[in-house]
Amino acid sequence: MSGLNRFCDALLEYAKRHCDGEYEIYATNGESFRVEILNGQIKNYSVNDYAGISFRVKKNGKMGYASTTSTDESGIPDLVTAAEENAELIENPDEQFIFAGADSYPSPKVYGEELDGVSASEKIEFAKLLEKKALEADPKIIKVEGSTVVSAKNTVVIKNCHGMDLCEKSDFIAAYVIPIASDGERMNDGFGVCGGFDRACLDADKAVKKGVSEALDFLGAGSVPSAAMRIIFRNSAFCDMLETFSGVFSSENAQRGLSMLAGKEGEKIASDCVTLTDDATLDYGFGSRAFDSEGVPGRRTAVVENGVLKTLLYNLKTAHKAGVQSTGNASKGGYSAPIGISVNNFTLSPGRKSLEQLCEKMGDGLMITEVSGLHAGANPMTGDFSLMAKGYLVENGVRGRAVTGVTVSGNFYELLKDIEEPGSDTYHNMFGEAVSSPSVLIGSAMSVAGE
Amino acid sequence: MIEKKIAEEVLLRAMSTGADYAELYVEDTTADSIMMIADCVDSANTSRNKGAGVRVFCGTNSVYAYGNGTDEASLLSLADKAAAAAGTARDARIDLVLNNVSFDPLCRAAEPVASVAKKDRVDALKQAYSAARGYSDRIVQVRAGLNSSVKRVYVANSEGVVGEDERPYIRLFVASVASDGSENQSGFVGPGTSAGFEFVRGLDLAEAGREASRIADTMLSAGKCPAGRMPVVMDNAFGGVVFHEACGHALEATAVGLSNSVFCGKMGQKIANEKVTAVDDGTIPGQWGSLSMSDEGEKTQRITLIKDGVLTGYMIDKLGSRRMGMPSTGSGRRQDYTFAPTSRMTNTFICAGKDKREDIIASTEKGLYAAKMGGGSVNPVTGEFNFAVSEGYMIRGGRICEPVRGATLIGKGYEVLQNIDMVSDDLELGQGMCGSISGSIPTNVGQPMIRISEITVGGEIE
């Protein structure tokens, strides 16, 4: 860390002498650990520490970027020159901002002190425990893939020409297990996960139970005849949908004609029971942070309230363009990427009914527990999706047999307006974007293709 | 890139606790990207990503330590970390002599992108952009980018091999959005290769731009695709994503070596229609997925995966080779030093057959013509895959009819392979990025036009 700090200070010094315009450093530094167990032995083990420094500079009002992973100070002149050359190529007239900093910042808890004390051998033992429990859970579980523990510690530093000097440390631990069931002819895998900011979140029973039941339930599961069917998206599946389409709430996408929510702030875009909140300040939220990637303080934002779009999500550039304030959603897709927009902790407010009660209400239909092919079969620009899905048939309000080999198709913008009722069973997405959602019952039938 | 003495010491230290193989991988990659949207250059970025990884094997178990430092102290520290995780100290030292191995340079930049002024790169990008933008009134937005990189790779291992490689990459992408006021549709092209700026000069940039917009504009007029099981004719080039997802991943040692593939134990068995012959070929000069040297310091190969429907080969990396008791096919690849390598695809395609395109369409009574495919994914354990059709048309009475959108094809890999009943003679390759446990890497997919006699099409229930 000290090598990184030294480099950042030297870079600031150099930039001060050489750059006419404003400039900013965004640096990350951290360490991570990963162990995977197979047959009681360490199959894969990986440790690392890494640093990445991104530098951006304004030249004639235009912003250029350059980044490096080397903290060798002799690389500073080239880094600055590359960023300035890149600034000279920019034609977009939108005003760009380097923030002077705010007077106060929230301090959401994102660092689990206890995790420092969890040793490598404890992590190895836990991964072994996951495999052991999964194998013992059922005779049809013939092996376990990926009994894995991952942990990471990360520091983000933002320093700039206005004296803004921010630093935030975060950490995380997670474990997952992939039990594989077989009936002699076919195999099927399930996935169970647990994680968070302290030892207590490593819950082997919870992860194994989910992984094993999924592996067993879907073994030999068949398809259904193609039909229009009533649908419940189970909580984790709806998290995936919200994550895939979260870009529709980005003001940058809206301003570029890439979201159909452009110009719809204040309008009803979803059904009455839909309330979506983005909150960077939640203690131990997987997406929490004190400041966004431009140093704007984190906050809680009501995005959709009872179906009405209250605001899109903004960074400094897009906010200025729209004549509003940044909502603290500036983000970088990796330390070296230019500033964009993403959600922090994006939550669909839960309702009152349990998943079982939603099934009762639905009567007959399909409960989708997993969707895949999201990177290819979903188009955030158009809202269209056609995704491979699996789940359970629901008959007479009761969960029935497992179903696989189907697709479900629709349009996300239509789906928002068609959510009939959210459940009470909120699931928090741990990997990817921090989206939280309960299970949701959809009002109209949707196209399901199967046999 | 690394002094031999240092590399030798790193490898010996890494093996000092009982590991039976050690590998040092060092990488230095510089990349540029320029992006246009809303009719102007919107962002420009340059990155330098440098780092190293030390990997050791103890039988079929692997330990990997990586970091950014590539100086002697950092590399030795990685070796110590790897050794510490691999076992406990012992005294025996192994003899190790490193020998430089040279690899035929398959991918060279005749005109390195670094030698081309950034303004000239912008001019080329603008040719593609403006052609896309001006295609029709209904094109409301275009995003286009030019990404280029040079990756320098160094591998040294305890088998005594030292190899280096320098890999140039360049790729243009154009994504167009067409709108009629109430709905959007999109189109995408992404030609690229492992070469220098000569690739861009040789491209018909305006045609590439127009193609992205043509797809978007056509799909705007398209109705929803019907759902159900039907024959699907898949056009060539990027249609090969079918094979990549339905079959390719399940033939990697990454899955097979752990008995996690539906194709385990099926060598010599008929797994596809006899019209199907498919290869993975990392040796094609100057192609997007080709490599002079694998990320494990081995020569890449042309691997015949399926011959006349019979399974004849897997893609195997060093660790997979140990697990499967079969020789490596030089298939070890990784995104960068932050990943340990595993067996991956290179240029993977169904070979040209004997049928004629016209006959394939003409002999299909009712089905879907997938002119352009989007991406997809697969679960090698169950064989279930999915992929998206980005430009589709109904076939009725042997003729291509109205455009349809929103189709996703799903199925089981081994079923689809049996159902490929026509394979034309017009093979072409298409560029993509493939993701797996060793990260995201450039791969080519490819095929001639093929027909799948029956597959589940996800669309709208009529």
Image (cartoon, coloured by chain):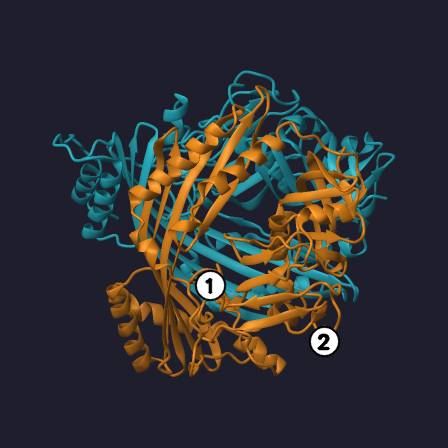
Q: Residue at x 66, y 51 (%)?
A: A439
Q: Which residue is drawn at 68% across and 70% down?
A: A305
Q: Nearer the viewer, residue A92 or A151?
A: A151
Q: Which residue is drawn at 57% across and 19% down?
A: A184
Q: Mark 1 lies on which chain?
A: A
Q: Are marks 2 and 1 on the same chain?
A: yes
Q: Say what secondary structure mark 2 lies in.
A: loop
The chain whose colour is cyan is B
Label 1: which residue?
Answer: A337
Q: Position of residue B393 (x, y in %)?
A: 79, 44
Chain A: its colour in the image is orange
Q: Name the amino acid type tagged 2.
A: Gly
- State the quadrant of the N terminus of chain A: bottom left
Q: Name the amino acid type tagged 1.
A: Ala
Q: Is residue A103 visible?
A: yes
Label 2: which residue?
Answer: A266
Q: Mark 2 lies on which chain?
A: A
Q: Nearer the viewer, residue B101 or B185?
A: B185
